[in-house]
Image (cartoon, rainbow, N blue to C red):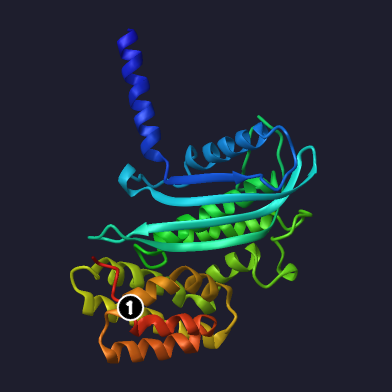
Amino acid sequence: MKRLIFIFIFFVNVFSLNAQELICNVRVNSNQIQTSDRKVFQTMQTEIYEFINNKNWTSTKIDNEEKIECTIMINISNKISNDEYEGTLQIQSTRPVYGTSYKSTLFNYIDNDFKFKYLEYQSLEFSNAIHLSNLTSVIAFYVNIILGMDFATFSEEGGNEYFNIAQKIVNNAQNTPEKGWKAFESDKNRYWLANDLMESRYSTFHAVMYKYHRLGLDNLAENPEDARFEITEAIESLKSIYRENSSAFILKLFFDAKVDEIINIYSGAFPNEKARIYKTLNEIDPSHSTKYEKIIKQENQIGR
């Protein structure tokens, strides 16, 4: 009987381990807080880690080797009260590139509007239906952005299910006092991130994510010329978004994550390819124009 119970528990645990979608490294930095007892911050880090990594965020079965790798860094700058903090949240997620050891950054962003309440050992609760706490809502919002960005690279509009959830989280938080959820507070915050990802005028972005990664990066090792062509076509497709709104939030996020990667991809390209992509990049991503000058100066590092 004991053996049967052990086998049952074993298979339940294996199923649970296979069900979670993320391998997320969580760090809580409290160096700016003057205190002699940092145990609460270690507990906070552990509980947020477990909240992210032990929860089933999708109905999709994902094997261990397919889990999405990400990092969430919480930098606490102020302790407002015994249970209230504020600081910044840095989120980064990556995707492996087929046939290489290279991991491509999909999302890299710092959220400067992060205020939350936390009591040590109090259960972290989240609901898609209502806003329960700013801590769990913000974390869940970015988990769904991470999932959406990853799924979008494997099928066109594959991330829309998770972007929709992220937008619902934004809608649920419209009556909260914390910043980051409302359109009028900034033109680059959680509201606009979710809005841009579901905005029909920017629907090209989803096709770009698929074409750039699945048809481009994943083939770069075996067919570099064809792969670069697909990547060039994908980047040029972003012109439609730029001409619709040159300050669109998703353009900034895309190029902030991809600028160094793009430079490496084209550093080994033919002169005509370099000229074509350089012209496009300087038009739609002028903030990184100085960096793009490196395209002709470096050897290709991706696909080796």
Q: Nearer the viewer, residue 195 or 116?
A: 116
Q: Position of residue 98 (x, y in %)?
A: 26, 60
Identified at 72% across, 33% down, the residue is 36
Q: Nearer the viewer, residue 51 or 78?
A: 78
Q: Residue furthest left?
A: 222
Tag count = 1
- Regarding mark 1 in the picture, which secondary structure is present there? loop
Q: Does residue 213 appear in the picture of this structure? A: yes
Q: Position of residue 165 (x, y in %)?
A: 55, 55
Q: Amino acid at mark 1?
A: Gln
19 shown above or below 191: above
Q: Residue 186 vs residue 279: left or right?
A: right
Q: Residue 11 vs residue 237: left or right?
A: left
Give the labeled residue for mark 1: 298
Q: Does residue 165 appear in the picture of this structure? A: no
Q: Quadrant of the N terminus?
A: top left
Identified at 48% across, 37% down, the residue is 54
Q: Position of residue 79 (x, y in %)?
A: 77, 45
Q: Position of residue 226 (x, y in %)?
A: 22, 78
Q: Residues within 10 Å of mark 1 (few under 14, many from 20)?
A: some
Q: Nearer the viewer, residue 185 or 102?
A: 102
Identified at 47% across, 46% down, the residue is 24
Q: Nearer the viewer, residue 220 or 155?
A: 220
8 shown above or below 107: above
Q: Residue furthest right?
A: 81
153 shown above or below 74: below
**Image quadrant of residue 33?**
top right
Identified at 64% across, 32% down, the residue is 123
126 shown above or below 9: below
Q: Quadrant of the C terminus?
A: bottom left
